[in-house]
Image: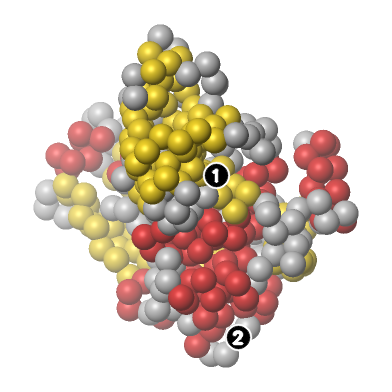
C-alpha cells in the first residue's frame, strides 16, 4: 500500500503520467486458441521498441506443452505482441481494437490482452457504459469516472499481465465497434482529468441508476471510502427506475436448497436489502443478487411480497448504487449542471486534477 501511494503521488506531482499512458485490458476469459487478423499483421516481443516480423493477414496462437505457438510453429517467447500496419484493422477473438494485442499463457489456457492508449480505451468504454444519446456533460462526467477507475486499477495491478477485464465486473469495453463522435468529444474535452482524494486516483465506482439515493461504499461494495457517501439523486422520479421481478418457488429452490421462503432480514441506512432469509438460510444480499443474476435482480432496493407460486419483488434502480449514478447525471446535465458539479455531487470531497495534457 505504501509503495502504491508513493507511486501515485509521484505520478501526480512529477507528471510521470503522460498522454502515452497505456492500458492492458484482458479480452474476456481464457481460451484455447486466439485468432488474429489485420492488414499487415506482424508479431514481436512484448516490449517497448521491439522488432516486429511480418505474418500476412491472419495468425492463430495456441498453447502446446506450455509453449506459445503461432500457426503451429513454437515460439521461444513468453508473450507475443501482435500489431497491424493499417490502424483500425487489428481483430482478436472477433473484436476489432485499437493498439496491439498481446497473447500470454493464463492459468491453464491463453489470455488475449489489448494494449492501447488510455484515451482510446476510454472512447470505447464510454460507448459501452453509457447511452450515447445522453447529454454531453453527463458523458464527460462518465469519461472522468472511467479514466479515474482505469488509472486506479492500473496502479493496483502494476506489472501484472493486465490491469482490467472487459466485462461488466470491471468496465465494459467492446473495442472499436461502439465509438462515435459524441463519446470521442466527451473523452477529448476531459483529456487527462482525474478525480483524486489525497492525491490518489479514487476508486470511481459508477452504476446505471440508484433509484433515488446512492449507496455508501461500505454497504454496496464493502469499501468504506470517504468519497463514497449516500447522496440524493433525481433518477428515482424516472419511470424507468421502477422494476418488478417474480421469482417462482421452483426457480428459487434451484438456486438455493430448501428455499421454502423469502424474507428481508435487514436493510442498510438507505433502505436497501442487506440480508435475506431464503428458507432456513440467511444469505448476504450481495451474494443473493449475484446468485439470482445481476441483470435479473437489478438492485437491492426492493420489497418482497409472497404470491401464489412464488415471490414478487418490487424495486428501484439498476446496479450497486455506489458513486456516480448515470441516469441521475443525465437529469442534472439536462438541468444545466457541468460535469465538474455532477462529479462533486456523487464523489464528495474529491478534487479534479489534470494528470497530463
Ligand atoms: Zn440515481
Which sits in the foreground, 284 or 238?
238
The residue that mark 2 highlights is 337
Image mark for residue 154: none
- Crowd around label 2: few <14 · some 14–19 · many ≥20 (10 Å): some
Image height of 268 relative to 126, above or below = above
Q: Position of residue 45 (x, y in %)?
A: 58, 30
Q: Is residue 86 left or right of residue 351?
A: left
Label 2: which secondary element: loop
Image height of 101 relative to 195, above or below = above
Which sits in the foreground, 145 or 257?
145
Which sits in the foreground, 142 or 252?
142
Q: Is residue 141 left or right of residue 353?
A: left
Q: Position of residue 152 (x, y in %)?
A: 67, 49
Q: Position of residue 250 (x, y in %)?
A: 14, 39
Q: Of label 2 and label 1, which has the lower sequence position?
A: 1
Q: Residue furthest left?
A: 308
Label 1: which secondary element: strand
- Crowd around label 1: few <14 · some 14–19 · many ≥20 (10 Å): many
Q: Residue furthest top?
A: 65
* Residue drawn 57% across the image and 69% down it: 187
Q: Indicate the quadrant where residue 24 lies.
A: top right
Cα–Cα span, label 2 and label 1: 35 Å
The residue that mark 1 highlights is 115
Amino acid at each position: 500500500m505504501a509503495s502504491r501511494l508513493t507511486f501515485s503521488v509521484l505520478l501526480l506531482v512529477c507528471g510521470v503520467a503522460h498522454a502515452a499512458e497505456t492500458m492492458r485490458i484482458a479480452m474476456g476469459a481464457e481460451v484455447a486458441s486466439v485468432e488474429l487478423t489485420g492488414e499487415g499483421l506482424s508479431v514481436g516481443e512484448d516490449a517497448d521498441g521491439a522488432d516486429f516480423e511480418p505474418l500476412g493477414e491472419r495468425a492463430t496462437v495456441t498453447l502446446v506443452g506450455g509453449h506459445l505457438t503461432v500457426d503451429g510453429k513454437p515460439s521461444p517467447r513468453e508473450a507475443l505482441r501482435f500489431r497491424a500496419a493499417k490502424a483500425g484493422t487489428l481483430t482478436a477473438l472477433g473484436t476489432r481494437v485499437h493498439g496491439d494485442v498481446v497473447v500470454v499463457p493464463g492459468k491453464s489456457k491463453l489470455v488475449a490482452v489489448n494494449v492501447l492508449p488510455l484515451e482510446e480505451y476510454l472512447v470505447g468504454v464510454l460507448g459501452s457504459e453509457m447511452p450515447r444519446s445522453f447529454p454531453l456533460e453527463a458523458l464527460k462526467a462518465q469519461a472522468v469516472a472511467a479514466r479515474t477507475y482505469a488509472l486506479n486499477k492500473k496502479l493496483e495491478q502494476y506489472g501484472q499481465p493486465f490491469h482490467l477485464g472487459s466485462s461488466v465486473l470491471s468496465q465494459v469495453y467492446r473495442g472499436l465497434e461502439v465509438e462515435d463522435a459524441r463519446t470521442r468529444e466527451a473523452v477529448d474535452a476531459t483529456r487527462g482529468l482525474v478525480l483524486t482524494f489525497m492525491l490518489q486516483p479514487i476508486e470511481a465506482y459508477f452504476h446505471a441508476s440508484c433509484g433515488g439515493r446512492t449507496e455508501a461504499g461500505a454497504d454496496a461494495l464493502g469499501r468504506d471510502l470517504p468519497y463514497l457517501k449516500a447522496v440524493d439523486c433525481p433518477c428515482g422520479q424516472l419511470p424507468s427506475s421502477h422494476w418488478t421481478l417474480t421469482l417462482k418457488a421452483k426457480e428459487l429452490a434451484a438456486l438455493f436448497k430448501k428455499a421454502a421462503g423469502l424474507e428481508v432480514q435487514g436493510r442498510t441506512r438507505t433502505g436497501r436489502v442487506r440480508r435475506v432469509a431464503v428458507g432456513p438460510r440467511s444469505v448476504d444480499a450481495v451474494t443473493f443478487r449475484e446468485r439470482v443474476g445481476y441483470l435479473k435482480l437489478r438492485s437491492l432496493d426492493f420489497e418482497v411480497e409472497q404470491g401464489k407460486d412464488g415471490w414478487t419483488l418490487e424495486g428501484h434502480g439498476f446496479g450497486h448504487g455506489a458513486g456516480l449514478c448515470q441516469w441521475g447525471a443525465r437529469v442534472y446535465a439536462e438541468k444545466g449542471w457541468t460535469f465538474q458539479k455532477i462529479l462533486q455531487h456523487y464523489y464528495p470531497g474529491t478534487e479534479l486534477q489534470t494528470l497530463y495534457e
